[in-house]
Amino acid sequence: MNKAAVMDTEKITLLEGRQHQVYEKKQGAGEVDISCDKTSLSGSVSQRACVFCGSRVVLYPVADAIHIVHGPIGCAAYTWDIRGAVSSGPELHRLSFSTDLQEMDVIYGGEKKLYRSLIELIDHYQPKAAFIYSTCIIGLIGDDIDAVCRKVAKEKGIPVMPVHSEGFKGTKKDGYKAACSALMKLIGTGPTEGIGKYSINILGEFNLAGEAWIIREYYEKMGIRVVATMTGDGRIDDIRRAHGASLNVVQCSGSMTTLARDMQEKYGIPFIRVSYFGFEDMSKSLYDVASLFSDRPEIMERAKEIVRNEIRKYYPEMRKFRAALTGRKAAIYVGGAFKTFSLIKALRTIGMSVVLAGSQTGNKDDYRSLKEMCDEGTVIVDDSNPVELSKFVLEKEADLLIGGVKERPIAFKLGVGFCDHNHERKIPLAGFVGMYNFAKEVYESVMSPVWQFAPRKGGLR
Amino acid sequence: MLLRHTPKEVKEREGLTINPAKTCQPIGAMYAALGIHGCLPHSHGSQGCCSYHRSTLTRHYKEPVMAATSSFTEGASVFGGQANLLQSVETIFSVYDPEVIAVHSTCLSETIGDDLQQITKKAGDDGKIPAGKYVIYASTPSFVGSHITGYANMVVGMTEQFAVSTGSKKEQINIIAGWMEPSDMREIRNLAQLMGVKIILFPDTSDVLDAPQTGKHEFYPKGGVTIEELKSTGDSSFSLALGCMSAEPAAVALDKKCKVPFETLDIPIGLSATDRFIMALSKTAGVKVPSVITADRGRLVDVMADMEQYFHGRKVALFGDPDQIIPLTEFLLDLNMKPVHIVSGTPGMRFEKRMQEILERAPYANFRNGMGADMFLLHQWIKNEPVDLLIGNTYGKYIARDEDIPFVRYGFPILDRIGHSYFPSVGYSGGMRLVEKILGALQDRQDRDALEEKFELVM
C-alpha cells in the first residue's frame, strides 16, 4: 500500500529556475554567473530563513538588553535560546519575551500592548536597552513601533530600538541591515575618553561557544584594546562608545559589513575583513590588524609570537589528523560565503578536498572568488535545498557535510560525517585552538565506526 | 542562575508573555501533514516560518523534515499571495512530485486575506494539479490558539477534503491521533492489531519521523496514512478521537460530512486512560481484550504497587500541551502523587472543562492555560510552593536547574535528549516507561542527597 521512496534522490534533476544558482567548475563551463541575492523560488524546499531571523541572530548576543518580539508567539518561541552565544555576565538575552498578539490585537492594533509590555519589562528587569523586533504582520496592521519606542525611551531613560525586521521584506541579509541600523543608532551615544589610538571593535563575532573571548585575548595580547565586540558577549555601554575605536575588524561578511561601512562614513573609522577560521586566515587576521598599527612595531612582533606559539602547540596533533584524512572529500553548505572560503582553506590544511561549496547568502563577487579557489569538478550552489545537497553529496562521494541544523540529519541519513558550523556548534571553532577543535571534530565524525554499519555500505550480513 | 530575575510575587501582567509554554499554529499543521504518506507540507508565508518549523521539528526528531514555502516578498504582501501559491503548486508537483501538498496559512497570509480554499480551487481549475494528485489546506493563523490548534485544523482539513462516504460501510474504525509522538502512533497500531481490530490511524508520523538509516535521503519516507485510507475513513463504522483538543474537531467534521459516529477519549497515557481506550476499542469493535494486553496491564499495576511508597504525596509541577497534560495529570493522581502546578499556553474551553473534571481529585492544584500561562508564571508558582518533580518539554531545564528540581522531559519540543520518538508513553507499556522515568528521577535525587549513613543499596 505504501509507495516506498517516491523520489530517488540520485536521479533528481535540478529545480527548474535553479540552473542559474548552481555551477560546476569544469573545462568549458564558462564564467561563473550565479544569480544570488534573490528570494527563493516559491514552492522550493529552501534552507533559508527570513529578515527577522537575520536581525535576531545579529542582535541576540547583546546580553544586557531585553529583546522583545512584537507579533504572534511563534517568532519568539522558535528563537528562544537556540544559539549558544555565551555571556560572561548578564543573560537577559536568553529569555523569551513576546507580545503574543491575538486576533483582537491584529484587528485593533498592537501598539498599546507593546507599550504596556515594554513598561512592565523595563521596570522589572532594569535593562540597559531594549530591542523591539517587528514581525511580518506588524507593518500590515499599521503599528507605529517607532513612536512607541520613542515614547518609552523618553519615559524610562534608556535606548529603546525598533528593529524593522518584517520577515517578508527581503532576505536574511536585509535582516542584518536592520540590525546594523539599530546598532548604528546606539553607537555614538557613549563617552570615548581614554580609549586611545590602539583600539579596535570586533564585528561579526557572536561568541558562539566562547569564540569571541579567544579572539579578544589574541588582540589584547598584541597590546590592542578591544572597545566593543558586536555582538558576541555584547554590552550596551560598549556599543555606545564603539565610535571611539580606531579600526573595525569585521568577520562574517554578510552580517556586519553594513555597520562597518556606516561607521566609516559617519565616524571615519576604517575597516578590514577577516576570518578566524583556520590557521591561515586566523594568522592573517592578526597580521592585518598589526600592520595597520605599524607605528608600534611591537604589536606585529607580538602577533608573530602568538602565531608561532599557537601553531607550534597544535601542529603535531594536526599532522595526525591530516595523515588520516588526506584524500577525503567534503561538502560545504553554510550561511555566509566568506565562511566557505575559510573552510576550504581549513579543510586543505587537513588534507581534505571540497567537492561542493555553497551558501545561503553569497553575492556575485563571493561566488567568483569561490570559483577561483575551488578545484576542478567542484559544484558551487546558492540557496540550495535538501534534494540538491543529497544528490551532490552522493554523486561526488563526499565523506563529510558541513552545515547547520537542517543539514545534519541529511548527512547522517546518507551515512556521511557532519560538522555543525552554525548555531549549534558546541565547541569553539575560531582561533588556533578552534582549528584544532575543527580538525578533531571532522576526524571523529569522518572516522566514526558507525558509517560502516550503514546499509549503503553493505548492511546486515 | 539563568532565571535569577524571576520574582516570587505573582503579579498579573498586561499583555506580555515571558518564556512561552506554547508556540504557533503552523508548526502543528506541518507536523500533522507529515503524517500523510507522500505528503509535502507547504507553508504559505515568509521563508522564515518554514525554516523555523523545520529546524524545530528536526531538533526534536533528529530527522530531516521536508516542507516547502511560498517565499513571500513585499509584492505578495501588497497584491496577495495567490500568485506565490499557484507558482508553488506548479513547482512542487514538477520537481518534488508528492502525492499531496498540504498547505497551511501563516499570520502574514491570513492578515493579507488570502483565501486558501479559493486559491487551491483555482490551482485545480488552471490545471496545475496533475491527475491523481491533491492539494489540501488548513487555515492556521498564528494569532489564534497554539500549535495544538494548528495540528487540529490540519487534521480537520484531511478529513473534510479526503473522506468520502460511498454508502457501504466498512468494518473498520478510525482512530484519530491527537498530538503524540511517532512511537505512540506505532503503539496505538500495535494495540489495535493485538486486539484484532482493523483501524485507520491518522495522522501517522511513525516511519516518517523515526525513519531508519538507509544510506539514502528518503524525501518521502515509507510511513504515513495513505490517501486511499483517508478517503475510506468516511465509510468507517466509528471514530475514536484521542484528545479533545487536537483530535476531536476532525471527528466532528467527519461525522458531519460522512455520518461516522464518534467518541472522544483522552490520549491513552497512564493506567486509567489506557483502560478507557482498550475498553472503547473492545466495545466498538465487539472484540475481547486478549490476554497479552491484560498481562501488560497487570505488569503496570504491579510496578505501581511495588514502588508505591516512592510516589506517595510527592509534589509535581507539569506543563505542556492539553491532550497530554489531561491524562498525565490523571496518571500522577493514580500514582498518589500531587500535581500542584499545571500550566499550558494553549487556550480552550474543552481543555479547561476536562481539567476541572480531572482536578476534582486535586482541589489544591494551581491550573492555568491560555493567555498569561507561561513558564515565568510556572516558575513563580514553584517558588511559592516548591515541588519534588518537574515534568515538561526541554524548556523546563532552566527552572529545574535554578530550583534544583528533578526533571522528566515530556512533550514538545525535546531538544536535548532522545527517546521520545522511539519509546512510546501510551498504552500500558508506555505507562511503565513513564513510571520508570519518574521513579528514576526521584530516586537519583534521593541517592544524590542522601547522607552517607542513609545512602541505601536496596530501594
Image (cartoon, rainbow, N blue to C red):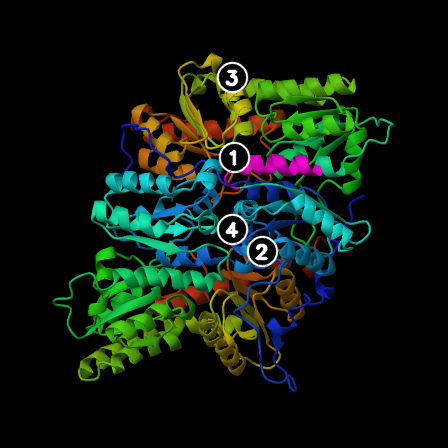
Residue B385 as seen in the image, left or right of residue B332: left
Using the numbered discs, state the Cα–Cα distance from disc 2 to disc 1 in whole angstroms. Answer: 27 Å
Residue A110 as seen in the image, left or right of residue B39: left
B326 w.r.t. B81: above or below: above
A392 w.r.t. B112: above or below: below
Q: Nearer the viewer, mark 3 or mark 4?
A: 4
Using the numbered discs, state the Cα–Cα distance from disc 3 to disc 2 in whole angstroms. Answer: 49 Å
| Quarter of the figure that contains the N terminus of chain A | top right
Per the image, label 4 sits on a secondary structure element best described as helix
N-terminal of the pair, mark 1 or mark 3, is: 1
Q: Nearer the viewer, mark 2 or mark 1?
A: 2
Question: Magenta region: which residues?
Answer: B142-158
Q: Amino acid at mark 1?
A: Gly
Using the numbered discs, state the Cα–Cα distance from disc 3 to disc 4 in whole angstroms. Answer: 35 Å
Using the numbered discs, state the Cα–Cα distance from disc 1 to disc 3 in whole angstroms. Answer: 22 Å
N-terminal of the pair, mark 3 or mark 2, is: 2
The percent coordinates of residue A277 (x first, y second) are 40, 70
Per the image, label 1 sits on a secondary structure element best described as loop
Is disc 3 in contact with disc 2, using a CB cutoff of under 8 Å? no
Which residue is at the front of the view, B119 or A175?
A: B119
Is disc 2 in contact with disc 4, using a CB cutoff of under 8 Å? no
* Mark 3 lies on residue: B358
Residue A19 as seen in the image, left or right of residue A187: right
N-terminal of the pair, mark 4 or mark 1, is: 4
Q: Amino acid at mark 4?
A: Tyr
Using the numbered discs, state the Cα–Cα distance from disc 2 to disc 4 in whole angstroms. Answer: 25 Å
